[in-house]
Image (cartoon, helix red, strand yellow):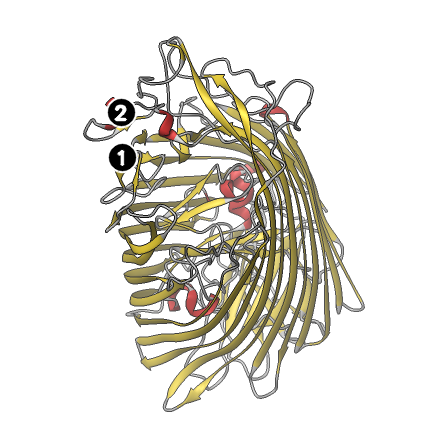
């Protein structure tokens, strides 16, 4: 199989579009030649030299070019309609239409089939908002139609059009995903199908579970796999996982872009992305970077961060590729924990109210801060043998250090902030309707207690993955077989102190009241965690319209924690477990799939590098997923849609013993019955759309846990609305102008598992306008057009994060 990737540029451009989708460059003269650059690769991504690429116009003589030794070609074409084909020995010729029109250039792809091979695996790259392939769910190049699981790809064009600056922004609107604002104000926090995925994040398929806020300056696309994915990734991933695919050198000479963004709350961000290649396109480099300073709708919040990532790509021949990448991130911010679900006679508390220690001259403690330093180094080697085997080895080491000090509202509700009269009432209580029945202070301005924590946490990850895959016919069937192994070593050091802080009033808290730090640590530990695993997967062609994807992984996971507190016990445990997945696919036509799948994952005690003496003897939590769904590619693969119905059940959940609060027992269960629908891609060459809907009926079962007299049994997990959805669309007009807009909606959810505080549902409207001509892009964003007051997440009943009122930004980019 041969795949043709192309990039349509005016002068020297950056982006790309499908062979059968209009490609434009703003207000370009119809008679002016447009430079089209591309590269011919096979299914594994290896460059294929010497292919003849022909462009045949409706009227006139065809233009033919030959790809060089690195698979790269260049051609000058006028705007118009063409038939494009690529020919190489051993491959069948296939023709597809191409239209050079007047919109931003995007990626072009063409797939050829090996002669005599009855099966062709179509691999198509990102096209605007369209993504018809993903490597995350199967770890091999495979069409989404061949994957019996829900997969969503957030493309680079969608990230840019939405103006996403964070993982939370980029995942907004992905069906089944809740990208929440909190996470103690120090890290990304994502829920997938009602389950936390805070440790189920990856970079190019390698675990990236450290607690920090990720920057997107080096992210090409984000892939979300929903449902257990332990068959290839191991422990965790109950609801799914998130994989960031990084930017790589394109081996097409000097090109790049620089950009500056300015927006509300003093938001300033600079980004750059520059690439070049030498030695006849055998050696390429790419350097991405960003620097950002910003405030927010929250008083005294600040963000100061920078990131940079150089990547080197060496391709000594057409069968071997070597990548080396370094990433560096520095993030400094005020760790914001939000508001309390309390109001008084003066009404609702302003959304900017901050209850931390953030003003005055620091005396006994520093002002609230969180400083993160994250680094990683990756070496990735790919090679194709002459017998068809593709081998891949990736080595990655990463380090993360977080130092923080924060004063916050105390989460111990035993003081009666909410009042027993409220807790005794049946049903739920809407946000900010709590009476201040037992709180101290003036009835007009109640007093709230606070706590204080300061800590240093460092984490080191070392992972190596070795894989091999091959397609071919054996045992009477076509197969795509993958075998792999993974070894990982993680260490985590944590030193934490818990202090005290003066109380403050609800409406006008004195943020200069300094906390008192403790000299005795509440946590002092060093943990060692080791993963050793093997896995295999096979996609089998059972009949002309039937396929079976089956796989299994075996994990050996060891944990040892050195608890350095006086008299403390140091726990350890070893888990050995299998994680299977099987999916049956029926494809009535080549552009559609109906599937059924079963998958299973395990979450060992301490899976998030948090093993304790109370959980060390308990077996893993187990999650099973039954899913039926359908996928379809429309309009020549430019528009894709998918629907899925699932039953996701997690058992052996750890719960506090009702007879011993210092002991954990395994009697809990969380079940999510749900359905998702999605659509993304291009309706016309100028009209792109991305949207979806999710229904999640999540419930906690068999739970003996009570908190402040409230049982968790039968309650809904926090931050999981029953109904949620989004729609985003853009349209490119003539002359380089365009506009877009959309909405995000959530029905009500709960701030905590006790379901005492109900966050009201909301709908938020956003808009964007752009001008893209030759080398210049100007984009303006307006968020929350109706200035809706909403609360998007709750980390507890005393940590509720308000959304931003109407705000905007302008982004200027220069491409070369």
Residue at image point 61% right, 18% down? 512
Of callouts 2 and 1, which one flags the residue occurring earlier in the amino acid sequence? 2
- In the displayed structure image, the side of residue 545 where residue 337 appears, left or right: right
Q: Secondary structure at mark 1?
A: loop
The image quadrant that residue 810 belongs to is: top right
Q: Secondary structure at mark 2?
A: helix
Residue lying at the far front of the rendered structure: 567
Residue 608, given in percent of the width and then of the height, sits at 49, 55
Viewer-side residue, 343 vs 406? 406
Q: Which residue is mark 2?
A: 420
Q: Mark 2: few, some, or many residues within 10 Å (few <14, many ≥20)?
A: few
Residue 181, given in percent of the width and then of the height, sits at 48, 37
Measure the alpha-carbon separation of dots 2 and 1. 9 Å
- Residue 1: tell me if it is visible: no
- Residue 41: tell me if it is visible: yes
Residue at image point 59% right, 50% down? 105
Disc number placed over residue 709 in the picture, else none: 1
Residue 559, given in percent of the width and then of the height, sits at 52, 64
Residue at image point 51% right, 45% down? 158
Viewer-side residue, 791 vs 680? 791
- In the displayed structure image, the side of residue 17 where residue 460 appears, left or right: right
Q: Is residue 382 above or below residue 732?
A: below
Viewer-side residue, 169 vs 653? 653
Q: How many marks can you see?
A: 2
Q: Are marks 2 and 1 in contact (CB under 8 Å)?
A: yes
Disc number placed over residue 290 in the picture, else none: none
Residue lying at the far bottom of the rendered structure: 475
Q: Mark 1: few, some, or many residues within 10 Å (few <14, many ≥20)?
A: few
């Amino acid at each position: 199989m041969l795949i043709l990737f192309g990039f349509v540029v005016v002068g020297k451009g950056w982006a790309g579009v499908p062979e059968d989708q209009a490609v434009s460059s703003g207000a370009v003269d119809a008679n002016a030649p447009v430079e089209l650059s591309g590269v011919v690769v096979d299914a594994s991504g290896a460059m294929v030299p010497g292919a003849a690429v022909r462009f045949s116009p409706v009227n006139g003589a065809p233009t033919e070019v030959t790809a060089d030794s690195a698979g790269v070609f260049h051609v000058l074409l006028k705007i118009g309609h063409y038939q494009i084909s690529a020919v190489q020995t051993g491959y069948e010729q296939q023709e597809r239409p191409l239209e050079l029109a007047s919109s931003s250039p995007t990626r072009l792809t063409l797939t050829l089939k090996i002669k005599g091979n009855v099966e062709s695996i179509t691999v198509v790259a990102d096209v605007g908002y369209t993504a018809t392939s993903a490597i995350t769910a199967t770890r091999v190049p495979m069409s989404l139609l061949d994957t019996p699981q829900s997969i969503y790809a957030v493309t680079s064009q969608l990230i840019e059009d939405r103006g996403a600056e964070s993982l939370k922004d980029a995942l907004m609107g992905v069906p089944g995903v809740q990208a929440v604002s909190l996470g103690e104000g120090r890290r990304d926090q994502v829920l997938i199908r009602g389950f936390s995925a805070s440790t189920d994040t990856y970079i190019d398929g390698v675990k990236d579970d450290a607690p920090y806020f990720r920057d997107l300056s080096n992210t090409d696309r984000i892939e979300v796999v929903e449902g257990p994915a332990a068959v290839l990734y191991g422990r965790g991933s109950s609801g799914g996982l998130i994989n960031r695919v990084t930017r790589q050198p394109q081996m097409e000479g000097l090109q790049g872009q620089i950009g500056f963004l300015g927006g509300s709350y003093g938001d300033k961000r600079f980004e750059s992305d520059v690439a070049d290649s030498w030695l006849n396109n055998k050696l390429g480099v790419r350097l991405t970077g960003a620097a950002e300073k910003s405030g927010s709708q929250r008083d005294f919040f600040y963000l100061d961060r920078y990131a940079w990532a150089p990547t080197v790509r060496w391709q000594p021949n057409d069968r071997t590729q070597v990548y080396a990448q370094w990433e560096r991130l520095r993030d400094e911010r005020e760790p914001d924990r939000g508001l309390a679900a309390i109001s008084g006679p003066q009404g609702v508390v302003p959304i900017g109210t901050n209850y931390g220690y953030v003003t005055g001259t620091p005396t006994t403690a520093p002002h609230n801060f969180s400083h993160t330093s994250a680094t990683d180094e990756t070496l990735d080697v790919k090679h194709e043998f002459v017998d068809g085997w593709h081998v891949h080895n990736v080595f990655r080491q990463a380090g993360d250090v977080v130092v923080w000090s924060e004063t916050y509202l105390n989460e111990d509700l035993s003081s009666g902030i909410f009042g027993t009269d409220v807790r005794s009432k049946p049903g739920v209580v809407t946000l900010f309707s709590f009476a201040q029945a037992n709180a101290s202070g003036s009835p007009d301005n109640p007093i709230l207690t606070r706590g204080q924590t300061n800590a240093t946490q460092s984490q080191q990850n070392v992972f190596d993955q070795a894989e091999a895959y091959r397609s071919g016919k054996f045992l009477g069937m076509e197969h795509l077989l993958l075998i792999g192994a993974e070894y990982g070593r993680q260490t985590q050091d944590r030193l934490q102190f818990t202090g005290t802080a003066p109380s403050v009033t609800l409406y006008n808290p004195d943020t200069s009241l300094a906390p008192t730090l403790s000299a005795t640590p509440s946590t002092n530990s060093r943990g060692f965690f080791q993963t050793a695993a093997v896995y295999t997967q096979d996609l089998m062609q059972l009949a002309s319209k039937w396929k079976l994807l089956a796989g299994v992984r075996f994990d050996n996971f060891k944990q040892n924690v050195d608890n350095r507190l006086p008299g403390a016990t140091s726990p350890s445990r070893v888990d050995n477990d299998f994680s299977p997945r099987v999916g049956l696919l029926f494809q009535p036509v080549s552009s559609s799939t109906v599937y059924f799948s079963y998958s299973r994952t395990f979450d060992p005690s301490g899976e998030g590098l948090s093993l304790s003496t109370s959980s060390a003897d308990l077996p893993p939590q187990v999650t099973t997923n039954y899913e039926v769904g359908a996928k379809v590619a429309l309009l020549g693969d430019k528009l894709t849609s998918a629907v899925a119905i699932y039953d996701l059940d997690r058992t052996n959940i750890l719960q506090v013993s009702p007879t011993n609060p210092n002991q954990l027992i395994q009697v809990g269960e969380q079940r999510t019955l749900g359905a998702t629908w999605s659509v993304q891609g291009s309706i016309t060459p100028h009209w792109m759309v991305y949207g979806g809907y999710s229904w999640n009926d999540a419930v906690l079962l068999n739970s003996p846990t009570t908190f402040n007299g409230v049982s968790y049994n039968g309650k809904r997990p926090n931050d999981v609305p029953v109904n949620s959805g989004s729609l985003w669309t853009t349209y490119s007009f003539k002359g380089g102008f365009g506009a877009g807009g959309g909405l995000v909606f959530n029905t009500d959810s709960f701030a905590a598992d006790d379901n005492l505080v109900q966050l009201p549902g909301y709908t938020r409207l956003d808009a964007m306008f752009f001008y893209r001509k030759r080398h210049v892009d100007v984009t303006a964003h307006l968020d929350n057009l109706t200035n809706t007051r909403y609360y998007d997440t709750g980390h507890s009943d005393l940590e509720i994060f308000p959304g931003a009122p109407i705000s905007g930004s302008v982004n200027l980019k220069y491409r070369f």
